[in-house]
């Protein structure tokens, strides 16, 4: 049997890089996307990965990536932007960009690859989400909304595609030590009335990210989802996931909201 072909978006760093590495080690043919493959340095390259250009803000680039990839058995929608700011002060063009990169671009790429998966009777699509979609946090509203949207697409479409052997699932990592905080786009106005609480949350997030789980741990869970006979709708890892999801299921919603706020220093 020929090795399965996997396309991993955002494969030059963090979770994407580790997923690509893990899949290569398990015998997959792996295509990894990055905006500019020619600019990758050695530390961002995984031996055995074929790199493909992809700019999720550009629909023509997404179409070109799908054509270049050809027949794909596994799609890991990992690439995305992290964003932070008070809802009142988030620029609309920043929200537009976030949803294009984190949601609409991923959905377009998925749509382009699904016919081939369905026709061959096999496919796995993994949306790399965030536990913030299940446990929303102040000043992360746009990011939370984008991750909820991505999870919603996958959850609703599962029954459409599973009869054809194509399974959609979401992996929600908790806080990860990937340096993503250094790349996060931040919006806070000079003299903003939200500055005090924004600063408290920002510092708490940085502290949590510094001691967060490793990207390789998330990659292991992504591989588990890919190789399951019937992947579950949702996998989560980090931030004591089994415990906090149990609390979320059993406790009133107001309690979990208060728990998240206090964990990040808000009264």
Image (cartoon, grey):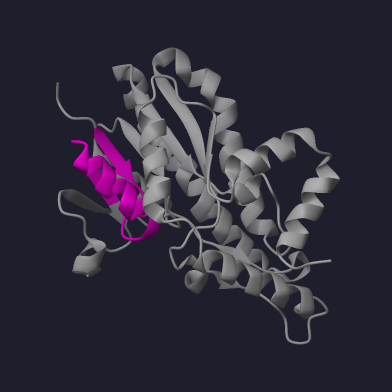
Residue 142, relative to residue 159: is it above or below? Answer: below
Let me know if residue 66 appears in the view: no
Q: Which residues are magenta?
A: 5-32
The image shows residue 14 at horizontal and vertical percentages of 38, 59
92 part of magenta stretch = no
In the rendered structure, does residue 7 fall within the stretch colored magenta?
A: yes
Which is nearer the eye, 100 or 212? 212
- Name which residue lies at 51% across and 26% down: 232
User: Does residue 25 appear in this view?
Assistant: yes
Quarter occupied by residue 95: bottom right
Quadrant where the N terminus sits is top left
Residue at the location (71% across, 60% down)? 263
Q: Residue at x 53, y 69 (%)?
A: 184
* Coordinates of residue 221 in the picture (x, y in percent): 42, 39
Q: Nearer the viewer, residue 182 or 94?
A: 182
In this rendering, position of residue 78 left or right of residue 27: right
Give coordinates of residue 171: x percent, y percent. 50, 40
Quarter the C terminus occupies: bottom right
Total tally of numbered discs in the picture: 0
């Amino acid at each position: 049997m020929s090795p399965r072909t996997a396309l991993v978006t955002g494969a030059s760093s963090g979770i994407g890089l580790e997923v690509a590495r893990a899949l290569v080690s398990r015998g997959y043919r792996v295509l990894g996307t990055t905006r500019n493959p020619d600019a990758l340095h050695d530390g961002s390259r995984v031996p055995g990965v074929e790199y493909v250009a992809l700019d999720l803000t550009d629909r023509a680039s997404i179409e070109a990536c799908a054509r270049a990839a050809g027949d794909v058995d596994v799609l890991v929608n990992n690439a995305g932007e992290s964003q932070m700011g008070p809802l009142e002060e988030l620029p609309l063009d920043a929200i537009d960009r976030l949803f294009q990169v984190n949601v609409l671009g991923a959905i377009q790429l998925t749509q382009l690859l699904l016919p081939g998966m369905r026709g061959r009777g096999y496919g796995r699509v993994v949306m790399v989400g965030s536990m913030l979609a299940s446990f929303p946090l102040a000043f992360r509203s746009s990011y939370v909304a984008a991750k909820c949207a991505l999870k919603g697409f996958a959850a609703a479409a599962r029954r459409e595609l599973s009869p054809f052997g194509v399974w959609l699932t979401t992996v929600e990592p908790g806080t990860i030590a990937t340096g993503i905080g250094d790349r996060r786009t931040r919006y806070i106005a000079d003299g903003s009335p939200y500055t005090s609480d924004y600063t408290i949350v920002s510092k708490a997030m940085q502290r949590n990210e510094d001691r967060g789980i490793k990207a390789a741990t998330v990659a292991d869970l992504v591989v588990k989802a890919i190789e399951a006979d019937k992947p579950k709708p949702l996998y989560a890892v980090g931030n004591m996931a089994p415990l906090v999801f149990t609390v979320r299921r059993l406790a009133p919603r107001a309690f979990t909201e208060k728990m998240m706020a206090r964990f990040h220093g808000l009264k």
